[in-house]
Amino acid sequence: MAILITGSAGFIGSAFVHSWFLHSEEPAVTLDLLTYAGNPDNFAGLRSAAGHTFVHGDIADRSLMQRLLAEFQPRAIVHLAAETHVDRSIRTADAFFQTNVIGTTRLLDEVTAYWRTLSEERQRAFRFLHVSTDEVFGALTAHDPPFNESSPYRPSSPYAASKAAADHAVSAWHTTHGLPVLTTHCSNNYGPRQFPEKLIPLCIARATSGEPIPVYGNGAQIRDWLHVEDHCAALRLVLERGAVGRRYNIGGYGETANIDMVRMLCEILDRKHPRQNGEPHHKLIRFVTDRPGHDWRYAIDPSRIRDELGWAPNVSLTQGLADTVDWYITNAQWLERVRTGEYRSWVRTHYGQ
Ligand code: NAD
Ligand code: TYD
């Protein structure tokens, strides 16, 4: 028995690989194209490196997928590979539609062809877990109820539109071909090894090097934050016990305005990593031009996964943020290696000097 994980060298993918080997002896074949966001350093310290086979490649490469599926005969696919950064999707969306839509549909094709070769019993037990996002549901106002699994699709950004298209494809392959799929919609994750283009690691990276911290617009936009470990626990549970064809929303009851999030991080950094000039980190905050089409608020109603599968988040936002700051301080070398590469050029392109 084995599972196949796509996007394994990214933020959530690598956290899932670590959590897989903490909780299971089952081998995992993991695939990643190693785009700017994929980092083999993320596998450092894996509990059971012997059960891990890493393959460098593209989910859109049909012959590679055919070979991997035939060779490793996985009982499940956990599909995390994607282009994921909203701001990049606003600048150029090609890679988003190539990987998130074309890549996902090719993967679905190849997995379906493989699944048909399995015995009836293995076909019934097989799962294709598609990791989607709450962003496919668009923006909420301050007074709207949180998203549930029946919320209509209203993607705002090219990223969200590409994920929405992928979700529809997954659902269509289930209805048309009978592939046993599961889909999850999670809110904003945070934790170790997140690429410092996303708000929390960006804030930590810039604050610890004394650089300005950019906050879009007035910073009043709200995100629901979930620690990546809690997301991985939810994914493991959905994979083992989720009902085929069903969607599960995953959220952290952690709604926070961006400016409050940045201020919380600044306070944590004041304690753990005081500035040499003695000034508080919040003095580095700069309000910058807002993101076009910026979704006002995301919030998740996770009642289904709580009631049907017994999942609840374990990590409080206060503890999770403090641990995350600790991780980035302790792993300054990880950050430095990332920051000397692609990160630098993105910051120049997006934020200017
Ligand atoms: P990430 O950008 O850190 O990692 C994505 C990984 O996919 C990278 O390692 C990259 O190299 C790989 N990849 C990209 N194109 C590929 C391709 N064609 N073939 C193989 N690998 C490829 O993203 P993440 O934050 O870890 O997100 C993982 C998944 O979770 C995505 O599907 C994303 O939509 C979803 N998600 C993320 C969040 C969040 O807050 N980060 C929230 C909900 C859902
Ligand atoms: P981000 O981490 O990019 O995640 P997403 O856009 O998928 O929610 O951004 C989180 C929030 O932080 C979002 O409302 C945009 C905001 N933000 C800033 O204010 N400044 C920044 O430099 C970045 C990257 C994001």
Image (tube, rainbow, N blue to C red):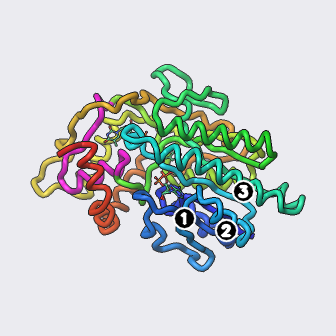
Secondary structure beneath label 2? helix
Mark 3 CB within 8 Å of ligand 1: no
94 displayed left or right of 2: left
Q: Inspect the image, locate mark 2, and give the three-letter code of the amino acid beneath it.
A: Leu
Label 1 Cα crowd, 10 Å radius (few <14 / some 14-19 / many 20+) = some
Q: CA distance from mark 3 to mark 2?
A: 10 Å
Mark 1 CB within 8 Å of ligand 1: yes
Residue 289 rendering spot, x and y as whole percentages: 26, 31
Q: Residue furthest top?
A: 143
Asked if the residues shown at circle 1 and circle 2 are in contact, with their CB atoms under 8 angstroms apart, the answer is: yes
Q: Which residue is mark 2?
A: 68
257 displayed left or right of 116: left
Q: Earlier in the sequence, mark 1 or mark 3?
A: 1
Residue name at image x 43 percent, y 64 percent: 39
Q: Which residues are magenta?
A: 197-219
Q: Residue furthest left?
A: 277
Q: Which residue is mark 1?
A: 57
Label 3 Cα crowd, 10 Å radius (few <14 / some 14-19 / many 20+) = many
Whether residue 10 is in magenta: the answer is no
> In front: 61, or 212?
61
Q: Taking the image as four quarters, which one is ligand 2 found in?
A: top left
Q: Earlier in the sequence, mark 1 or mark 2?
A: 1
Asked if residue 31 is positioned above or below residue 204 in the image, the reply reads: below
Q: Inspect the image, locate mark 1, and give the three-letter code of the amino acid beneath it.
A: Gly
Q: Which residue is mark 3?
A: 111
Residue name at image x 46 percent, y 33 percent: 157
> In front: 240, or 124?
124
Q: Inspect the image, locate mark 3, and give the three-letter code of the amino acid beneath it.
A: Val
Q: CA distance from mark 1 to mark 2?
A: 11 Å
Residue name at image x 13 percent, y 48 percent: 279
Residue 176 rendering spot, x and y as whole percentages: 79, 41
